[in-house]
Image (spheres, helix red, strand yellow):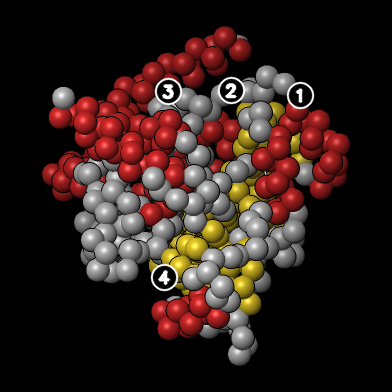
Amino acid sequence: MAGAARAREEIRRFLDIGAVQVAELDLDGDQGVLRPGPGSPPVTHGEVFVLVRRHGRPVGTLLGRVPEGADPRIVLEARARAECADAQTGAPGEPPYASVVVATRERAGQLARALDSLLAQDHPRCEIVVVDNAPVTSGTRELVERKYAERVRYVREPVPGLAAAHNAGLEAVRGEVVAFTDDDVIADPRWLTELTAPFAADPGLGCCTGLILPARLTTPAQVLLESHGGFAKGFTPRTYDPARPPVDEPLFPFTAGRFGSGANMAFRTAVLRAVGGFDPATGAGTAARGGDDLYGFVRVLAEGHRLHYTPYALVWHHHRETWRDLETQAYGYGAGLTAYLTAVLVNRPALLPAFLARLPRGLAHARALTAVRTADDGTGGGGAPGDHDARTHPWPRRLSRLQRRGMVYGPVGYLKARRALRAAVEGAG
């Protein structure tokens, strides 16, 4: 009875979460420029999640409340100038020739929105490749051929799974650097330049990841996810070097989720091909449920290449919208985490001693990762969505339990996915 009452209370608190406006504030000049986030209406009174820019680059976020009748720009600018530091000086260098791969499956409406933003990039030389993964209709092909003609290349991959689709894109691209993003994002016009320029500056760089912020915060599920960090990795650029393991990352390189996410990542094409691309038995659309991006990060690091995170390469992500979506996501994240670890050890068993040495701390990290997270007590002002240290809403126990169940299932799911992949290959032969 107590458990049922607690579950009802969690659902009640979840449904009480209100919508938050999304906006951008550029602090260049004496007077800041406030504009709504992509696809959002003009900012009014109420809660506002604000991306703050300096010199066009993202430097921070804040959650502000605009009183009724007040000027939103004046209210939010005062806080932003006091709280958000300047961007690092120096514009990005000349980026290399780049390819963008977008894997999709039966979501032509979302895909069109993403492609429009990719075609508006300021990168001087790039190509866009759409991979239609195990399609059941001709909708994606027709969209690309009708609306985007010569500007976007179309590739069909019959084997289901995000990693298989990414591998098909990897095989098709011509760029020195290959970037991956999802069909549910809107890319900032500077995204591809900021994400790929670090490769020209560092010949030892194998991977670069970027900033992911919410395009909308209109449902309780979207606000809850972002208030507990979402996909954001902060506003400080950082380079991870396997030759100099970070002292603050005792599980390095196995805590790959800290490095970035698959909706905003790029690899030196030759490096990713040399490690065999992504394991096709990982990723959404397989029994493993996820982990393909994390697998790619660890494989590149394990070969001695550096990984760089830059907050200046921004995509706006459309978070999932419902409670059921969050349940699916929590279980999938847990499964993907242990599935990718299984994949790494299966494909590169030489990493097993290093993994075993980190296992005790890894188990402690897993417990902390899936612990019930409480809300901020209010003394810190509530905390902005995207802030990992201050939370506006408690994380439901059910979602923590589902993530733990997913972690137990992950290795089994990976082995199931390998068997399914083997059967699909044999059937095609």
Q: Is residue 229 left or right of residue 180?
A: left
Question: In the rendered structure, are the residues bearing label 3 and label 1 in contact, judged by CB atoms less than 8 Å apart?
Answer: no
The CA distance from mark 1 to mark 4 is 43 Å
Residue 324 at what x, y percent from top left?
Answer: 43, 30
Residue 148 at what x, y percent from top left?
Answer: 82, 43
Residue plotted at (77% across, 44% down): 152
Q: What's the residue type where badge 4 is placed?
A: Thr
User: Dot 3 lies on which element?
Assistant: loop
Q: N-terminal of the two: label 3 or label 4?
A: 4
In which quadrant is the N terminus drawn? top left
Q: N-terminal of the two: label 4 or label 2?
A: 2
Question: Which residue is at the front of the view, 310 or 392?
Answer: 392
Question: In the rendered structure, are the residues bearing label 1 and label 4 in contact, judged by CB atoms less than 8 Å apart?
Answer: no
Residue 336 at what x, y percent from top left?
Answer: 38, 35
The answer to whether residue 358 is above or below residue 142 is below
The CA distance from mark 4 to mark 2 is 38 Å
- Residue where numbered disc 2 is placed: 159
Question: Which residue is at the front of the view, 241 or 25?
Answer: 25
Which numbered tag is attached to residue 301?
none
Q: N-terminal of the two: label 1 or label 4?
A: 1
Question: In the rendered structure, are the residues bearing label 2 and label 1 in contact, judged by CB atoms less than 8 Å apart?
Answer: no
Q: N-terminal of the two: label 3 or label 1?
A: 1
Residue plotted at (81% across, 47% down): 151
Q: What's the residue type where badge 2 is placed?
A: Val
